Image: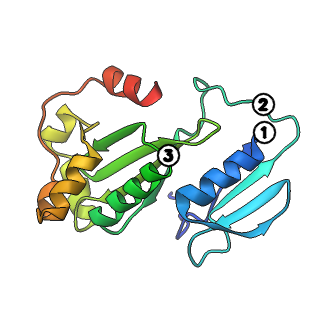
Amino acid sequence: MTVLPPYKLAHVVLRTANFVHMVNFYKTFLGAHASYETDQISFLTYDEEHHRVAIAAIPGTTPRNPTASGMDHVAFTYSTLHDLLTSWRQRRDMGVVPILCVNHGPTVSIYYEDPDGNRIETQIDAFKDMEEATAFMKTSEFAENPLGAEFDPAEMLAKLEQGESEEVLIKRPNIGPVSFKDMTAKYLK
């Protein structure tokens, strides 16, 4: 038996002891605004949904333990490589820099960390549909390296602005095996 799945992911709620910084970060990071906000809770949206991220100042909340079990990150998808890289440049210009940039194959992804140490992925889908992405994930190339190849977003954006096609730029280079330990060490530093 299979459980009936939901039709969409509605929102993420973050508990914090660092309320003002977290709210300001997510407003900046997502280009969001509050649909409702007090000094203890903020409901943020950037689209038609009444809120995509909520941030709550819950009494007794302690700082995040980065080595504890739990959700690792939340991901936000952009429509095009140009949009992903434009948002990267805008964030960089506001002092928000990524912790890791990786072409996973199925996605091209840029990872960040918020003031509480929660990780956020911004990405694009690298294939025209999920069937093609899933097929790539079943290849020996992906089995050899399920993590991907790091990239420089400034270099990729420059190539894009010089006329190189998104289709060429989003194709993951085959760099051979990548150590899970090495990649996660960069991600968790």
Looking at the image, is mark 1 or mark 3 earlier in the sequence?
Answer: 1
Q: Residue at x 61, y 55 (%)?
A: 26
Looking at the image, is mark 3 or mark 2 earlier in the sequence?
Answer: 2
Q: Which mark is residue 102?
A: none
Q: Is residue 9 left or right of residue 159?
A: right
Residue 175 coordinates in the image, percent (x, y): 13, 34
Residue 13 at least partly seen: no
Q: In the image, what residue type sits under mark 2?
A: Thr
Please state which of the two labelled residues, at mark 1 or mark 3, is closer to the viewer: 3
User: Where is mark 2, residue-wise?
Assistant: 62
Q: Residue furthest right?
A: 59
Q: Are marks 1 and 3 in contact (CB under 8 Å)?
A: no
Q: CA distance from mark 1 to mark 2?
A: 6 Å
Dot 3 surroundings within 10 Å: few (below 14), some, or many (20 or more)? few
Dot 2 surroundings within 10 Å: few (below 14), some, or many (20 or more)? few
The quarter of the displayed image where residue 18 is located: top right
Q: In the image, what residue type sits under mark 3?
A: Gly
Residue 109 coordinates in the image, percent (x, y): 34, 49
Residue 3 coordinates in the image, percent (x, y): 55, 60
User: Where is mark 1, residue-wise?
Assistant: 17
Q: Are marks 3 and 2 in contact (CB under 8 Å)?
A: no
Mark 2, secondary structure of its residue: loop
Q: Residue furthest front?
A: 93
The one of 19 and 72 positioned closer to us in this rendering: 19
User: Where is mark 3, residue-wise?
Assistant: 95
